[in-house]
Image: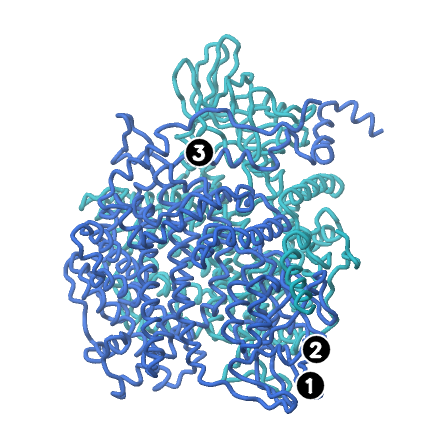
């Protein structure tokens, strides 16, 4: 383009201040209203040790170019992927240099806050090898993988097959003559699909394939298979592999596909810790009791639940800080003043906004504490299982499935609501919430689809209920479920005693209400299935509801237990008080949202539901002064938030304009494409004007 | 090294049967009504012909090709969009397209572009607000694209509250000019579509300052970039505001003015005027007329919601008929006498998600159409000097815009998730769609703020009804249901069987009672117990929603009763299906809001249980028509741009084809391999050598 001017002049904003009062002043006022000590609450929530580690690692990452986070907003998929590779390699180097532990690396990834191409090597390939390899395989696969000499992924789902593992099509046929397995993809739908790290990165894969021995199908089993050359990274003959293309989020990972064309692998590829295939004869040796592995799933899910809590916390941090700064309209009944002048009212002062955001803060704390409770119970259960007591396992496993489903759904909804609560600017990626939502979404699908999971939980609840009625439950083996179901069975016509809103502020009353509503749902469902002969498929809507009711009870109970069991040293009186209010808000707001179920069960009356509604708003008003401090206590550094709106210092508008100056389109005065697409029209007009002047 | 530039291709083998085309054919065979008749009723034959004609042109024009859309980076998106904008102008001329045909082209292309705001805001504003002289100077040139414009209202620190805008336009009596100025950083115009890179003119909303007095925001038409070389004019800082959650094909921009002078004629002077020299302000006449236009805009938004939901439902329903998961042990699906995995559409849970979405699309169709009718009726009445309809119509339209766009956003996302894992792929067609659709919940009035307008009107009407100042009317349903409530505030729902709940009268009474109850209680808390407006905002949002749900349900039911096309004998089957959809829409909505129906005392627990069962019964009844009902929206594959939602059901074939198009698959070995992967792996290949090299 020939121009009479220098086109490469970046656009800069004039040096002007935002209209007063500025963000830092407004946040300062909010923080001065806190009734409790922010650091003390952070320590209670995370533990001091964790916070120290986080600070230490934060300093390192902030100084590392490979961990820079602004450029991701502007990059196309390819550039983002390249930058993520750089981060992965640098993480390996820093781990060696600084001796990072697994927990350190967890913090690194938490702060970096973006999936990267090696992710599945760590989260699936290594753990699977660790659990499923025999000693020889540990040496051959696992130890090399730890040193990154091989890089792997976990290939289970297929183009036509997701949650139903039994539906997988890929086969691994044992060839006795050569003592090999032949892996094969019979149809297009059998292509491995969605496999993270597979598309472009991995040279190995754990492949789930139907084991076929002498014509008999033993169902899906894991194989560790080399897929790309270690010399030059090209796919090996017989393998078609690539990236599945752009996604709603997660674009910094190379989710891939793979098809096998009669691909032979040696006998040792079959992961043989639990089951074996005898060389030569092809005799199949069955696995031992698999119950122990359910324990591990509980831990994995506790981790996911914790992640959901952090997602909610992050959304709330951004939305609340920005709502304290963003002003809109003048509330005529109660105009806000600044230096004796009426200003527009900060949106955080509108009750609708408080109702939206403070309930999300309460959800965040509830979910974080529930994940800790789940982890504690996991430890207890592991101990018990060592002693041969499996009575907690089923209950814990069922609750953890349901909680994974409920809390990831809550997190998504809450995060998106926080983004929208930021008004128009929430739509800018600089809000820091757009990518967060896009990248978080898969959590409702993976590690068990949320709808499918609810069926597992409810099956357990129904079974427990039936066994209680039949008197087959050992009453000494009390767990949460048997407790509330028995209570209901003893008195199925009980009603809520509250006659004033304040009476709802009572953990016992609340837990009874949630227990009753959950049990009522279970009882109704059992009746539908067992007495009225309805099919499982026809009651799936209620199945999901019953699971939710149970898990909400678990969340409410965990929150109260966490507070009650905290020592005075760990939780001071002011921190305890604010957490107590949050626990009430969480419980009553949850009750309000599902009030129809409480009413239909007959436990709550219409009059009580009105009291409840007012009580929720009273709690919102009570907690309002602590709003900013409660999100400060989540202790998220600005580096993590990567948000112009949610910064700790409140310099929202300055940050927003600084980000905008980095937009690649603003590095030139006139846009590419002007000559071709705009100029012809405009110059025709100029020509006409000149002609008419003549 | 072998050729690294070999694109990756799938082997040529079929998916596991039964294939999508066969499954969809089986679904279509189950339809109980004629799909084409429903399509014709919804769109008219003449519109469908235009659609086919335009579609044929677009599918054969490279500027309208959509196959790379999901791979484009932002600069590529902007470039492709500018190309489309230019080509559309040319095609319009070549084919002599009318406004409706251009609208169809934009609908089918389905992505906003830098020129979008030129058409949707700049030109309409110029049409409505200019004097004859200004029409010649601005509008005529804009129509010929000799100038390209945008509409600059919101600012960095100011959104929905127009009165809070900071940008000033001070009249300079001496030179008969206005000086436009941005006093602070928060005064930067922000979010303005088309401004970032494309526009050379802008309508700027700025506070009019005359002889030191502030007259509030007024519109100015201002040149911002050189017509010679497109550089920003001196005194102006303008640019793009960066990447967004969606809408990245539009150059939403910012602009700041530094004591920027514009001539007197820039002030758009159709309604109010500034006298040259003296700077005397001449007030605008009654502004009520412009409220009528807002109703029209919102009716269009509601009709747009119908399309948005229809699109999402089309993809999810078709794919759910093709996607199979688990074997339903109690009722195994067979194909050629073999048990196959059950198509997910056969699971009740999936039906509970999909079928209400279809019903809501039809609800929005009937409501949008009725709003159009009322708009025209109202315009005619206002021309006669009768403003009686306006307030109710305007209030309902605000709330309906809010309710239906919120419904659309959540339905699109739910349909995307109902597609399971593959919904997360951009090739589902629903990801980018969700991202691009989202701003609808914010613009043309933020959804939460709009509900306040509606609620204010509802409360005012209630007070009038109580004071005996309002009478029943053929057009004002608000007054009618409030009167009914006040006659018997302790009324109870008479239903004793699930089938009773299908009675239209009963449904409308229930929705009316629930809305009236909420309004009455809110009025009581404000008027009798002295609660402030702010403390009531949660309830205020609820009563607006209750009212608008009443409107949607009512319009759906009444349209089926009164539209003579459905009375024709040949449309009897059609009417039956639509009646079921109306019932499903009503009862599903009721179930979602059950807490309010129970709290009002109108419903009891037994009725709630009946309701639940009746919803499931309706799902079963509608289920066989699921695919036919989305087919009736007649959305072409070009528009859907989805591997999962194709008409022919060839999901897996088109999905793998799309994956072959991924740029990363154009090379065998990924670009970062040498730098980031090879060193680690080669270290393992030759440990001794690697160790030695380190020493």
Q: Where is residue B179 in the image (x, y as percent from the top left)?
A: 68, 80
Q: Label 3: which residue?
A: B652
- Marks 1 and 3 sit apart, C-alpha to C-alpha, by 67 Å
Marks 2 and 3 sit apart, C-alpha to C-alpha, by 60 Å
Q: Are marks 2 and 3 in contact (CB under 8 Å)?
A: no
Chain A rendering hue: cyan
* Camera-nearest label, 1 or 3: 1
Give the labeled residue for mark 1: B172
Query: Are circles 1 and 3 on residues that touch, CB within 8 Å?
Result: no
| Few, some or many residues within 10 Å of mark 2 (<14, 14–19, 20+) | some
Check disc 1: other Cα within 10 Å, few if <14, some if 14-19, many if 20+: many
Q: Is residue A71 above or below residue A389?
A: below
In-front residue for pair B445/B94: B94
Task: Count the marks.
Answer: 3
- Closer to the chain start, of discs 1 and 2, is 1
Q: Which is nearer the eye, A641 or A580? A: A641
Tell me the residue at 61%/58% (across/down).
B251
- In the rendered image of the structure, the colour used to display chain B is blue
In the orientation shown, which residue stands out farthest toward the top? A177
Q: What percent of the width, then of the height, locates residue A96?
A: 73, 39
Chain containing the residue with disc 3:
B
| Secondary structure of the residue carrying numbered label 1 | strand
């Amino acid at each position: 383009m020939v121009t009479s001017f220098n086109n490469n002049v970046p656009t800069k904003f004039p040096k002007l201040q935002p209209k007063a009062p500025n963000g830092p002043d407004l946040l300062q006022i909010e923080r001065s209203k806190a009734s409790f000590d922010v650091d003390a609450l952070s320590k209670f929530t995370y533990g001091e040790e964790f916070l120290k580690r986080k600070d230490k690692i934060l300093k390192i990452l902030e100084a590392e170019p490979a961990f820079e986070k602004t450029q991701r907003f502007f990059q196309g998929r390819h550039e983002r992927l390249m930058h993520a590779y750089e981060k992965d390699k640098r993480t390996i180097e820093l781990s060696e240099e600084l001796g990072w532990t697994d927990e350190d690396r967890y913090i690194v990834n938490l702060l970096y806050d973006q999936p990267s191409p090696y992710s599945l090597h760590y989260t699936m390939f290594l753990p699977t090898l660790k659990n499923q390899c025999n000693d020889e395989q540990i040496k051959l696969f696992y130890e090399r993988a730890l040193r990154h000499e091989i890089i792997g992924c976990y290939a289970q789902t297929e183009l036509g097959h997701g949650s139903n593992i039994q539906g997988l099509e890929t086969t691994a046929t044992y060839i006795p003559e050569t003592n090999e397995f032949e892996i094969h993809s019979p149809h297009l739908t059998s292509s491995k699909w969605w496999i993270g790290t597979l598309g472009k990165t991995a040279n190995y894969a754990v492949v789930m394939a139907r084991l076929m021995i002498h014509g008999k199908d033993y169902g899906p089993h894991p194989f560790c298979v080399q897929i790309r050359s270690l010399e030059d990274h090209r796919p090996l003959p017989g393998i078609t592999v690539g990236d599945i293309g752009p996604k709603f989020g997660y674009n910094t990972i190379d989710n891939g596909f793979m098809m096998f064309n009669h691909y032979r692998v040696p006998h040792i590829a079959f992961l043989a810790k639990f089951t074996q295939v005898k060389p030569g004869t092809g005799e199949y040796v069955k696995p031992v009791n698999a119950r122990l592995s359910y324990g591990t799933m509980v831990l994995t899910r506790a981790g996911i639940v914790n992640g959901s809590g952090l997602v909610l916390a992050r959304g709330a941090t951004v939305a609340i800080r920005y709502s304290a700064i963003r002003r809109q309209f003048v509330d005529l009944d109660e105009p806000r003043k600044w230096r004796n002048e009426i200003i527009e009212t900060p949106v955080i002062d509108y009750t609708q906004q408080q109702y939206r955001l403070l309930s999300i803060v309460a959800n965040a704390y509830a979910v974080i504490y529930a994940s800790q409770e789940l982890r504690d119970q996991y430890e207890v259960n592991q101990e018990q299982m060592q002693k041969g007591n499996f009575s907690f396992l089923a209950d814990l496993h069922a609750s953890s499935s349901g909680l994974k489903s409920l809390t990831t759904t809550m997190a998504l909804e809450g995060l998106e609501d926080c983004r929208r609560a930021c008004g128009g600017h929430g739509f800018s990626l600089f809000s820091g919430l757009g990518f967060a939502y896009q990248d978080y979404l898969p959590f409702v699908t993976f590690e068990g689809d949320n709808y499918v999971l609810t069926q597992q939980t409810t099956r357990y609840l129904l079974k427990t209920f039936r066994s209680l009625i039949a008197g087959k439950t050992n009453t000494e083996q009390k767990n949460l479920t048997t407790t509330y179901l028995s209570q209901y069975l003893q008195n199925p016509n009980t009603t809520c005693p509250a006659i004033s809103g304040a009476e709802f502020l009572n953990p016992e009353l609340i837990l009874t209400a949630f227990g009753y509503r959950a049990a009522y749902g279970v009882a109704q469902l059992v009746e539908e299935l067992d007495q009225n002969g309805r099919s499982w498929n026809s009651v799936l809507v209620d199945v999901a509801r019953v699971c939710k009711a149970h898990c909400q009870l678990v969340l409410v109970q965990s929150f109260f237990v966490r507070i009650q069991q905290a020592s005075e040293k760990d939780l001071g009186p002011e921190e305890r008080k604010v957490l107590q209010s949050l626990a009430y808000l969480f419980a009553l707001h949850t009750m309000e949202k599902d009030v129809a179920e409480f009413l239909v069960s007959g436990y709550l009356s219409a009059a009580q539901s009105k009291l409840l509604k007012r009580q929720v708003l009273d709690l919102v008003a009570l907690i309002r002064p602590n709003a900013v401090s409660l999100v400060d206590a989540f202790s998220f550094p600005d580096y993590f938030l990567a948000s112009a709106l949610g910064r700790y210092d409140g310099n929202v508008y300055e940050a927003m304009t600084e980000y905008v100056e980095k937009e690649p389109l603003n590095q030139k005065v006139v846009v590419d494409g002007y000559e071709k697409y705009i100029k012809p029209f405009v110059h025709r007009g100029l020509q006409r004007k000149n002609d008419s002047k003549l | 090294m072998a050729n690294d530039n070999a694109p990756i291709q799938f082997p040529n083998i079929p998916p596991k049967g039964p294939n999508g085309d066969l499954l969809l054919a089986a679904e279509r065979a189950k339809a109980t009504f004629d799909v084409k008749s429903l399509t014709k009723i919804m769109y008219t034959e003449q519109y469908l012909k235009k659609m086919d004609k335009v579609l044929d042109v677009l599918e054969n024009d490279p500027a309208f090709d959509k196959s790379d859309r999901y791979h484009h980076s932002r600069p590529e998106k902007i470039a492709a969009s500018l190309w489309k904008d230019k080509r559309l102008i040319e095609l319009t001329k070549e084919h002599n397209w009318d406004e409706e045909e251009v609208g169809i082209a934009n609908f089918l292309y389905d992505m906003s572009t830098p020129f979008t705001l030129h058409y949707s805001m700049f030109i309409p504003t110029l049409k409505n607000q200019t004097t004859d002289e200004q029409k010649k100077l601005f509008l005529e040139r804009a129509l010929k694209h000799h100038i390209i414009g945008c509409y600059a209202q919101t600012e960095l620190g100011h959104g929905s509250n127009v009165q809070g805008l900071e940008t000033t336009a001070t009249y300079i009596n001496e030179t008969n000019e206005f000086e436009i100025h941005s006093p602070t950083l928060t005064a930067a115009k922000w979010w303005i579509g088309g401004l970032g890179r494309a526009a050379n003119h802008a309508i700027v909303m700025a506070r009019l300052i005359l002889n030191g007095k502030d007259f509030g925001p007024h519109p100015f038409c201002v040149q911002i970039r050189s017509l010679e070389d497109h550089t920003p004019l001196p005194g102006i800082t303008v640019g793009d505001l960066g990447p967004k959650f969606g809408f990245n094909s539009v150059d939403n921009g910012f602009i700041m003015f530094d004591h920027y002078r514009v001539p007197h004629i820039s002030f758009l002077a159709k309604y109010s005027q500034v006298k040259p020299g003296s700077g005397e302000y001449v007030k605008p006449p009654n502004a009520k007329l412009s409220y009528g236009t807002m109703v029209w805009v919102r009716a269009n938004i509601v009709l747009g919601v119908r399309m948005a939901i229809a699109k999402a439902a089309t993809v999810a329903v078709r794919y759910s008929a093709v996607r199979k998961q688990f074997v339903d042990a109690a009722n195994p699906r067979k194909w050629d006498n073999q048990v196959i995995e059950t198509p997910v559409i056969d699971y009740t849970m999936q039906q509970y998600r999909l079928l209400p979405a279809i019903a809501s699309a039809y609800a929005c169709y009937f409501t949008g159409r009725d709003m159009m009718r009322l708009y025209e009726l109202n315009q005619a009445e206002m021309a006669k000097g009768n403003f009686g309809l306006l307030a109710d119509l305007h209030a309902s339209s605000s709330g309906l815009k809010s309710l239906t766009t919120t419904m659309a956003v959540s339905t699109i996302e739910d349909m995307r998730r109902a597609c399971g894992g593959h919904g997360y792929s951009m090739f589902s067609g629903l990801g980018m769609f969700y991202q691009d659709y989202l701003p609808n919940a914010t613009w043309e009035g933020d959804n939460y703020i709009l509900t306040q307008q509606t609620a204010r009107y509802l409360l005012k009407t209630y007070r009038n009804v109580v004071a005996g100042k309002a009478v029943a009317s053929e057009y004002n349903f608000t007054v009618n249901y409030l009167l009914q409530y006040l006659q018997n505030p302790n009324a109870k729902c008479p239903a004793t069987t699930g089938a009773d709940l299908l009675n239209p009268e009963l449904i409308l009474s229930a929705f009316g009672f629930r809305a009236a109850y909420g309004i009455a209680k809110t009025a009581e808390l404000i008027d009798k117990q002295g609660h402030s407006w702010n403390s009531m905002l949660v309830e205020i949002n609820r009563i607006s929603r209750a009212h608008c749900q009443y409107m949607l349900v009512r319009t759906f039911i009444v349209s089926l009763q009164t539209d003579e096309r459905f009375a024709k004998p040949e449309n009897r089957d059609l009417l039956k299906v639509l009646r079921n959809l109306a019932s499903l829409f009503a009862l599903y909505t009721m179930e979602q809001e059950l807490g309010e129906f129970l709290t009002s005392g109108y419903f009891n627990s037994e009725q709630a249980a009946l309701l639940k069962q009746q919803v499931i019964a309706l799902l079963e009844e509608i289920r066989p028509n699921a695919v036919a009902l989305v087919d009736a929206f007649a959305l072409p594959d070009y528009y859907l741009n989805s591997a999962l939602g194709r008409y022919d059901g060839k999901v897996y074939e088109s999905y793998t084809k799309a994956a072959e198009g991924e740029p990363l698959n154009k090379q065998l070995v990924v670009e970062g391999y040498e730098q980031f992967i090879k060193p680690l792996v080669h270290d393992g290949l030759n440990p001794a050598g690697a160790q030695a090299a380190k020493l």
